[in-house]
Amino acid sequence: GENVEQHPSTLSVQEGDSAVIKCTYSDSASNYFPWYKQELGKRPQLIIDIRSNVGEKKDQRIAVTLNKTAKHFSLHITETQPEDSAVYFCAASRGSQGNLIFGKGTKLSVKP
Amino acid sequence: GAVVSQHPSRVICKSGTSVKIECRSLDFQATTMFWYRQFPKQSLMLMATSNEGSKATYEQGVEKDKFLINHASLTLSTLTVTSAHPEDSSFYICSARPSAQGGNSPLHFGNGTRLTVT
């Protein structure tokens, strides 16, 4: 089955710096890769996603890149702000029903 | 749009009792819903895929007789934790996407249920 690896597990940056989180997946049939932000005790919130027919997608300060050949995708956050502090999860969609398999998460801390 | 409502948000029960958690899609129909479990500071682990009108599909290692799933309508799935024990204490979250959208579209999550078994 699908396996998603995520690195790093923790990331601390200064406000204004960029943050990069990387994920790899194992199932070459996976075709959808969302990123979720989860604050303590709350539901995961979708922040950006990318489909397998696209190599890069950007939404203001957030961008995602996908390398299908290498089976890895990355989240890039520029000009980080303290409110970006949270746990970020990558995921890969498995099968026709689109089961999402999640990475282990990255705790991002943005220091003012 | 695409709101998923989950109840209760918190529940405390005694060991040996059963607890039912409801997941509703408020403004869309969902043929399929997904149940996840999350331990503190850990990732979301897929427990099962709930299918409207048919049996749920459980992930390896998840006891189907322990975690009963019923998906009786296109807007409601329930998870019942039977004979709960302290090790079942966790954060349970459901998710769904509109039936009209394919598997490569966003999943929307409920607020989750914090279960504590004493």
Image (cartoon, rainbow, N blue to C red):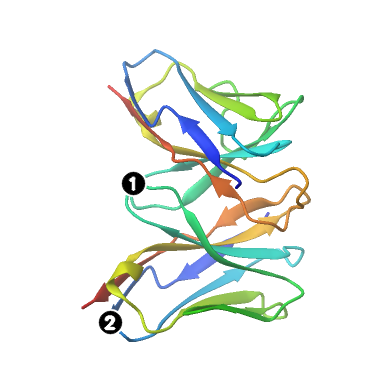
Disc marking residue B100: none
Q: Of the residues shown, which amino acid type is indicated by label 2?
A: Glu
- Do we see residue A64 in this rendering? no
Q: Seen in the image, is A37 located left or right of residue A25?
A: left
Residue sitting at 37 percent across and 84 percent down? A79
The subunit letter for the residue under badge 2 reads A
Q: A82 or A103: which is nearer to us?
A: A82
Q: Which residue is mark 1?
A: A41
* Figure check: A94 above or below B47: below
When the figure is inspected, residue B63 is found, relative to residue B95, above or below; the finding is: above
Q: Residue furthest left?
A: A112
Horizontal side, residue A64 vs residue B90: left or right: right
Query: Circle 2: is it few (<14), some (14-19), or many (20+) Cα within 10 Å?
Result: some
Judged from this view, the residue extending furthest toward the bottom is: A17
Q: Residue at x 73, y 71 (%)?
A: A52
Instruction: Using the image, determine if residue B49 lies above or below residue A55.
Output: above
Image location (x, y in percent) of residue A18: 39, 85
Whether labels 2 and 1 belong to a single chain: the reply is yes
Can you name the residue that lies furthest to the top here? B17
Q: How many marks?
A: 2
Whole-percent x, y for residue B97 in the image: 66, 46
Image point 73% across, 29% down: which residue?
A: B52
| Residue A24, placed above or below residue B4 | below
The amino acid type of the residue labelled 1 equals Gly
Q: Quadrant of the C terminus of chain B?
A: top left
Image quadrant assignment for residue B87: top left
First in sequence: mark 2 vs mark 1: 2
Q: Position of residue A56 (x, y in %)?
A: 64, 81
Residue that label 2 marks: A15
